Amino acid sequence: MSNAEQIEYWNSKVGEIWVQMQERMDAALTPVTAALLAAADPQAGETVLDIGCGAGETTLAVDAVVGEGGHAIGLDISEPLLARARERAEALQSEAEFLAADASQWADERGFDLILSRFGVMFFADPQAAFTHIHSLAAPGGRLVFACWQPATRNQWATLPLTALAHLLPPLPPSDPLAPGPFAFADAARVATVLENAGWHDVTCHSLPFAMLVGSGADPIADAVSFNLKIGPAARIVRDAGIGDAARPVLAEALRPYLKGDRVELPGAVWLVTARA
Ligand SMILES: C[S@@+](CC[C@H](N)C(=O)[O-])C[C@H]1O[C@@H](n2cnc3c(N)ncnc32)[C@H](O)[C@@H]1O
């Protein structure tokens, strides 16, 4: 099965929006990044592969730890995001390498000590085949550590905008919960089965609830509204329906209860998945 649809998607305007939103996404996901890196526990001298590395936040963090004796590679299918990652590497004088490739097909012989991903592994057309291939990239005993979203019902950053705007939108068509997309790995039992059938051992799925920062600065509510209209499940639907102006005040009201001090935070929940080759 081909990932062509996802390759087109992440190279469309969406890739450029993610580039614009890079700093804000990295801020929003800080608790996930910290937990992911703690679970991954990279060591000096290790070879590390970051799958669906996007703008490179986790690849760059790992590269700083593995040092000159090690090597970190970020793989992604999105040219705009890879360009941003390379820019950041240059600015940091990082040796991290960023390659354009579909992780379900990219071949390499070196045997990675650690394969990690922050939300980059839920987009494969055939997850079983993809994780079987990714297993072939790991060194014997190599670690796999990734973060993926729990069900949307536990991720209010995704559901709140759609619920608040429902009366302004046409009825949403039913969607396939297993189709490639942010919530494709929401079912931890399915993730474990996919990984075990792909040859991975010692699979664990650890639940990580966290508060996702969606608004801050001088006007945190306006900031949160603009965040929700740029990224996440509501953004594309609102764009396609052409209701951006009507959506703003409605979203502002829905987000107000989540303002604490100068931050708007919405509940999120992630699976931190670990396994061994
Ligand atoms: C939700 S974004 C996460 C990006 C980054 N890891 C982060 O946390 O900011 C998902 C990323 O996975 C990438 N991706 C999707 N399918 C892929 C595939 N088959 N091979 C490599 N990367 C893929 C996308 O291009 C996108 O950059």
Image (spheres, helix red, strand yellow):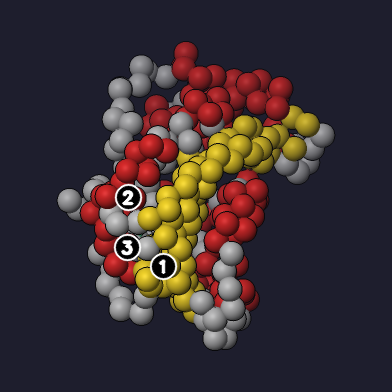
Name the amino acid type tagged 2. Answer: Glu
Question: Which mark is on residue 213?
Answer: none
- Looking at the image, which residue is at 19% across and 53% down? 2
Relative to residue 114, is residue 94 depicted above or below? Answer: below
Which residue is tagged 1?
Answer: 141
Q: Earlier in the sequence, mark 3 or mark 2?
A: 3
Relative to residue 128, is residue 224 depicted above or below? Answer: above
Task: Choose between 81 and 35: the one closer to the eye.
Answer: 35
Element carrying mark 1: strand
- Looking at the image, which residue is at 61% across and 74% down? 64
Element carrying mark 2: helix
Q: Earlier in the sequence, mark 1 or mark 2?
A: 1
Name the amino acid type tagged 3. Answer: His
In the picture as drawn, the residue positioned furthest to the front comes out as: 202
Relative to residue 95, is residue 127 depicted above or below? Answer: above
Question: Which mark is on residue 135?
Answer: 3
Name the amino acid type tagged 1. Answer: Gly
- Looking at the image, which residue is at 57% across and 57% down? 39
Q: Quadrant of residue 236?
A: top left
- Looking at the image, which residue is at 32% across and 43% down? 193
- Residue 114 seen by the camera: yes
Which residue is tagged 2?
Answer: 196
Residue 259, percent from left and from top: 74, 29
- Residue 53 seen by the camera: no
